[in-house]
Image: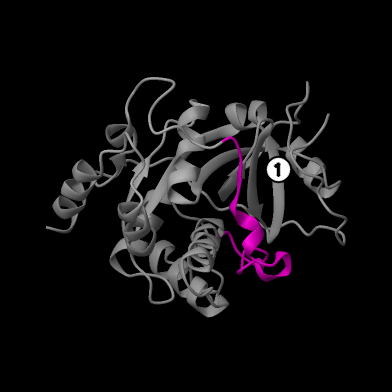
Amino acid sequence: MTTMYPIPPTPPRTFGNFGKLAPKFNAKTLKLSKYTGPMTPISPTPVGKVFREYKVPPGKWGMLGNDQVGDCTIAAIAHMLMNETVHTGTLVTPTLAEVMAAYSAISGYDPATGANDNGCAITDVLEYWRTHGLSGHKILAWAQVDYQNFWHVKQAIWLFGALNIGIRVPQSAMDQFSNNQFWDVVPNDGGIIGLHSIPNFGYGSQGTNCITWGQRQGMTWNWFSSYVEEAYVIISSDWFNQLTKETPSGFDIAALETDLKSIVA
């Protein structure tokens, strides 16, 4: 199989932990399709390929505690904050202490005893990010994306810079990660061994790219369709300000602005 881009040689890849809980309803969750349209193809039309993750140096991502505890949901938003700030200003890299403090606040994890290392629901983490912030940065809101519609997925990454996805992880994905291979569907995947939260920063004709356990990882569209179970875009002030300056034709910015005001009211 020809990959979207060659994955460069890396030292032995280190697995982290999982830590995503099952999808959880939150009344503040917006729907991205409301501001674009329900049809496929929809307007605005995303560009053919985007690789936003390359602006952060590969060795800069880090595990952010996910090699120690099940804080993947916090590590994911920390990586999203890094990606956003490197594109809109100066790179902000959350510290391990900040990430662990957020994980403790949301999950009840006790770093002194190791108790309550039970993971978090993505929407609980996004609400914490909205109300409390991370590294001094708060978000305005988040919007759910139809992850089975690849046009919506591409559009989300193109418009908002990233896609926060929750995945079911088969054993085959661990084997492929260890061997520096794309995540792809195999006849016997070995069964689901955990739930994981990761950010997607790019896409091409064959699949999409994420950062997981501090490493860049690709996945085919077939794998994405088979194992993703939730997906959200993040609406932050810095990125939103850029969006309003260059609003693509067909994007209903006025409706989004109205909904953002209702969330903070």
- Residue nearer the viewer, 63 or 35: 35
Is residue 132 located in the magenta-colored stretch of the structure?
A: no
Magenta stretch: helix, strand or loop mostly: loop
Q: Is residue 56 magenta?
A: yes
Res. 195 in view: no
Q: Position of residue 47 (x, y in %)?
A: 53, 37
Residue indicated by mark 1: 218
Residue in the foreground of this view, choosing between 160 and 229: 160
Query: Can you see residue 156?
Result: yes
Image check: 55 left or right of 82? right
Residue 262 in the image, given as x and y percentages of width and height: 14, 51
Question: Whole-percent x and y of residue 168?
Answer: 59, 37
Residue at 77% across, 35% down: 172
Q: Residue at x 49, y 46 (%)?
A: 163
Q: For the point 66% across and 31% down, which residue is it?
A: 205
Left or right of residue 183: residue 29: left
Q: Residue at x 46, y 37 (%)?
A: 155
Q: Which residues are magenta?
A: 48-71
